[in-house]
Image: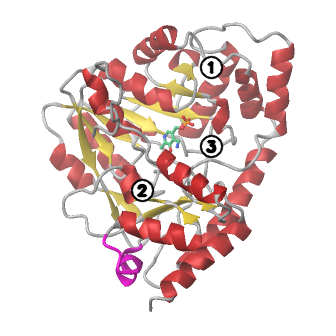
Amino acid sequence: MNLVAPTADFALAQRVAHLGTETVFAVSAEAAALAAQGKTVYPFHLGDLNIATPENIVEASLQAIRDGKTTYCPNAGIPQLRDALAADVSRARGLDYAAENVSVQPGGKPVIAKFLLTLMDPGDEVLYPNPGFPIYGSLIEFLGGVAVPYTYIEGSERFHLDLEGIARQITPRTRLLILNDLHNPTAAECAPEELARLAELVLEHDLLVLSDEAYFDVRFAGTSRSLVSLPGMRERCVILYTFSKKYAMTGWRLGAAIGPKPIIDVITTLNVNIESCPNHFVQYGAVAALSGDQSGPRAMMATLKGRRDAALEVLNATPGIHCLTPETTFYLYPNVTGAVKTTGCADHESFRRLVLERTGVSFCTRLHFGHALDGESEYYLRLAYSGVSTAQIQEGLGSLKALIESYN
Ligand code: PMP
């Protein structure tokens, strides 16, 4: 992977050579540079929200500051929040977690490193999604594991987990599996029979699972399911939970690891070693988020649905582009193979640059979510509509459509 170019004239630790990054931040910098030149930029690249955190959460946190919750707190988080999280996660998944199963974290992301530090030995093979959140592969390799990618396959209605590929790639060295059902970037979610087959594989091969459920509560219709709810899975899964998306709290940095007590206890000892405890006063905001008025998240989902529909309408009217309709996340993953060919672009990156320069529409492509796997021949973009208004979506994607049409 080696995306970090050492520039210092002193020796960095060898492991740094294996550290990856989120290349989406480079796309952000490029978009910001264009905007600074006075060009209109439509920011579809970053999975952040331009929606305010609900007022009851803000108010509870401010009150906590005034009440002196500005000290260290218990390493695993305040008891009220651990209780509230155990109850919320149990209710939605039909389980019986208690506070002892919850370790509060400064964001969802830290759960990835702490899960691997707790369960992965050097040389262990870890199955992870590619395309997928780029931090999985980065951290597996940084921490001495062997990152084994599995993929998603585009169907007529939705993307499917490549279960056959997963089964084929399991070896005696495979120890862990990372699953991000309700998936970034494809927005895929498993059907019940797919989750059942995955659970079978996990049991048969004695695997442990990181179930990254960052988008579990970000959905427009239907009900989210978790692998954790299936028989035998609660004992083998750690849930990555985050407040970032559901409550528009990305910058607050608050999440949790939820799972079997022996694993959670080690994760909490990692808290002691790394940050002592999560930010104290924001946890009162999180208790208010879980137990209080849900009109904020409901309004956010209504806004996001309007944006999703506006984006889908333009994308599916654009020659050489088709996009499935997901009921979850705030991402679209259109197949743009035809449009790439029409414009004469040789690869994902030249298409991205062409569109950015000609229309100001900024997005990530499949390659920001891993690397192309053998035999991959289709082109995909990831459009995040969490930080763009419906009017910007219509205008920006309208220009993209006009650009593609100008080649026909
Ligand atoms: N997992 C996935 C799949 C994500 O997309 C993200 C954020 N982009 C995270 C984890 C981490 O989010 P946070 O640290 O803000 O909770």
| Residue 227 image-quadrant placement | top left
Query: Which one is closest to the eye, mark 3 or mark 2?
Result: 3
Quick check: is the Cβ at mark 3 less than 8 Å away from ligand 1?
A: yes
Instruction: Give residue 191's mark.
Output: 2
Query: Which one is closest to the eye, mark 2 or mark 1?
Result: 1
In the picture shown, does residue 77 fall above or below 369?
Answer: above
The stretch in magenta equals 336-346
Instruction: Give residue 245's mark.
Output: 3
**Residue receiving disc 1:** 82
Amino acid type of the residue that numbered disc 1 sits on in the rendered structure: Arg
**Whole-percent x and y of residue 10?**
31, 18
Instruction: Give residue 220's mark.
Output: none
Dot 2 alpha-carbon crowd within 10 angstroms: few under 14, some 14 to 19, many 20 or more: few
**Whole-percent x and y of residue 355?**
50, 71
SS label for mark 3: loop
Query: Which of the two discs, 3 and 2, labels the residue nearer the N terminus?
Result: 2
Quadrant containing the C terminus in the rendered view? bottom left
SS label for mark 1: helix
SS label for mark 2: loop
Q: Are marks 2 and 1 in contact (CB under 8 Å)?
A: no
Dot 3 alpha-carbon crowd within 10 angstroms: few under 14, some 14 to 19, many 20 or more: many
Q: CA distance from mark 3 to mark 2?
A: 23 Å
